[in-house]
């Protein structure tokens, strides 16, 4: 067996490896930030002059404003509906045995593996066959299905970490089931519920592939508006809006981590 | 005790969602069996012609390319995902841990458009990478990174890494640390300590990574 390097050396090597990987993950975000603050209209590195003008241009662009508003409408509805549906089903999944339980769970988790492309196309064809106009209802339904697995997972994991004796105690002290639910179970689930909702909201707001199918000009969400923009223009407004996107998403994830323990929700913590 | 309060209320909305999803997939399935009528948006009668068209050599090549790129993506994601997952689980410092976690999962939550655009800025002919290499004098003319296998795999590894890290970290964090201590006491070096107890828990995770991001692939990859 070859001699192993000493412990501190191994640690140093590990640190360098991990830093390099984190650098790879951050590279696009850092580079797009450089591009966004570059005064020139074409890409050039490193930038010679800095300016905020691409941010101003991006914020003033009508399609982005409309896309942002549409996105908020869709995200608000989709994430809230997904939260209610997902939390209810997670409770049933954790507590009860019932017919078709596994089948239902499999179907509801499968949007994780079915390409969003197929789901979007499916909802488009379905809406056309049912004679529905391509309004918000179809987009919201599509987004609910797509984000549901994330809500399910996050609520389910908080349920698993919940001490069932607390509910039993409440029940044995005479609380009827609905009181146990509203005064014991749901308050204890708040971190899981909020982070599940937050996941759903971020994913729905950023969803592009399926949205491309189910939106029309009038209802297009921000990612679709960005796609249409980047197909026609090449100025750094797109970089500016990407920076805003990245900053907002990273901030929300950081907040979720600080307040609700992302590690616990993602189930990557040592159970202690 | 067999009482199941609220069972119906809990399951009914989810059932509705599942039905909508199944109906959407059934709609695609049904559409795939309908004939194409030239000059009309309405599909014709039922036919298998669409599936027969898939047998064209062009599609076979695309399919093989996809499988190859998936394989490369899964391989590289595993190679660079493992150290990150290990660091995430074993970092003692809470702040460091949350920094790793947030950086590792953010690509998953950024939309395809923003993520892919950022990679175009990095990999394009006037992009960051080429500019830096030119400045450093390592290359004389811009290297084509976009639309190459290298570019596509790089962008795909970037998206699939969060999924890999989350799954590996979930598995690693549920390995009892006492096993590692045990291995250490029995005289195993740091390297063996890392390898032995975790191998079994890891096998199930390998091939889950490259399913997320077709659109990313087709965007960076399409000429």
Image (tube, coloured by chain):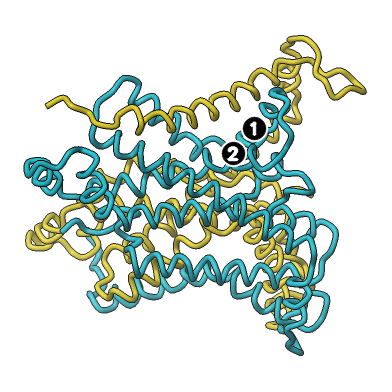
Vertical comparison of B48 with B96: above or below:
above
- What subunit carries mark 1? A
Q: Secondary structure at mark 1?
A: helix
Question: Could you tell me which residue is drawn at 58 percent across and 38 percent down?
Answer: A141
Residue nearest the viewer, comparing B195 with B119: B119
**Disc 2 crowd, CA 10 A, few/some/many (<14, 14-19, 20+):** many
Display colour for chain A? cyan
Question: Could you tell me which residue is drawn at 23 percent across and 46 percent down?
Answer: A160
Residue farthest to the right, as pictured: B39
Among the 4 quarters of the image, the one containing residue A100 = top left
Q: Is residue A17 visible?
A: no
Vertical comparison of B52 with A262: above or below:
above
Label drawn at residue A26: none
Q: Position of residue B17 (x, y in %)?
A: 49, 32
The residue that mark 2 highlights is A142
Q: Is residue A92 left or right of residue B18?
A: left
User: Marks 2 and 1: same chain?
Assistant: yes
Residue nearest the viewer, comparing B48 with B98: B98
Q: Earlier in the sequence, mark 2 or mark 1?
A: 1
Residue nearest the viewer, comparing A198 with A16: A198
Question: Could you tell me which residue is drawn at 57 percent across and 59 percent down?
Answer: B110
State which chain is coloured yellow: B
The residue that mark 1 highlights is A123
Q: How many marks?
A: 2
Vertical comparison of B59 with A186: above or below:
above
Among the 4 quarters of the image, the one containing residue A63 = bottom right
- What subunit carries mark 2? A
Q: Are marks 2 and 1 in contact (CB under 8 Å)?
A: yes
Q: Is residue A75 visible?
A: yes
Q: Position of residue B83 (x, y in %)?
A: 37, 62
């Amino acid at each position: 067996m070859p001699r192993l390097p000493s412990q501190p050396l191994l640690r140093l090597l590990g640190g360098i490896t991990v830093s390099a990987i984190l650098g790879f993950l951050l590279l696009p975000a850092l580079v797009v930030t450089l591009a966004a603050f570059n005064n020139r209209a074409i890409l050039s590195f490193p930038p010679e002059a800095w300016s905020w003008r691409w941010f101003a241009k991006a914020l003033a662009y009508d399609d982005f404003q409309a896309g942002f508003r549409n996105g908020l409408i869709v995200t608000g509805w989709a994430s809230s509906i997904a939260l209610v549906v997902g939390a209810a089903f997670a409770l049933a999944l954790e507590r009860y045995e019932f017919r078709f339980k596994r089948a239902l769970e499999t179907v509801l988790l499968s949007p994780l593996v079915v390409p969003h492309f197929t789901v979007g196309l499916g909802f488009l064809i379905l809406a056309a066959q049912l004679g529905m106009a391509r309004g918000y209802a179809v987009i919201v339904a599509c987004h609910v299905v797509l984000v549901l697995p994330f809500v399910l997972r996050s609520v389910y994991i908080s349920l698993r970490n919940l001490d069932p004796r607390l509910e039993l105690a409440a029940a044995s002290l005479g609380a009827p089931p609905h009181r146990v639910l509203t005064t014991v179970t749901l308050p204890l689930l708040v971190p899981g519920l909020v982070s599940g909702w937050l996941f759903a909201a971020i994913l729905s707001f950023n969803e592009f592939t399926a949205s491309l199918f189910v939106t029309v000009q009038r209802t297009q969400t921000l990612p679709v508006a960005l796609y249409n923009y980047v197909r026609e223009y090449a100025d750094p407004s797109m970089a500016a809006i990407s920076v805003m996107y990245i900053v907002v998403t990273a901030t929300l994830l950081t907040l979720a981590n600080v307040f609700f323990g992302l590690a616990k929700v993602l189930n990557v913590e040592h159970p202690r | 005790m067999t009482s199941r309060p609220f069972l119906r209320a809990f399951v009914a909305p989810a059932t509705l969602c599942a039905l909508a999803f199944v109906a959407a997939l059934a709609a695609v399935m049904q559409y795939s069996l309908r004939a194409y009528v030239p000059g009309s948006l309405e599909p014709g009668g039922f036919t298998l012609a669409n599936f027969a068209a898939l047998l064209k050599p062009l599609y076979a090549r695309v399919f093989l390319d996809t499988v190859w790129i998936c394989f490369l993506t899964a391989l590289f994601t595993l190679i660079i995902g493992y150290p990150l997952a290990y660091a995430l689980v074993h970092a003692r410092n809470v702040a460091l841990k949350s920094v790793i976690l947030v950086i590792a999962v953010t690509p998953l939550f950024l939309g395809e458009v923003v993520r892919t655009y950022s990679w175009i800025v990095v990999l394009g002919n006037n992009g960051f990478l080429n500019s830096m290499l030119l400045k450093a004098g390592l290359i004389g003319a811009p290297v084509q990174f976009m639309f190459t296998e290298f570019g596509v795999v790089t962008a795909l590894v970037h998206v699939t890494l969060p999924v890999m890290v989350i799954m590996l970290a979930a598995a690693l964090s549920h390995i009892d640390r006492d096993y590692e201590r045990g291995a250490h006491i029995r005289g195993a070096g740091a390297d063996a300590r890392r390898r032995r107890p975790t191998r079994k828990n890891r096998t199930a995770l390998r091939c889950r990574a490259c399913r997320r991001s077709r659109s990313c692939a087709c965007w960076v990859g399409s000429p």
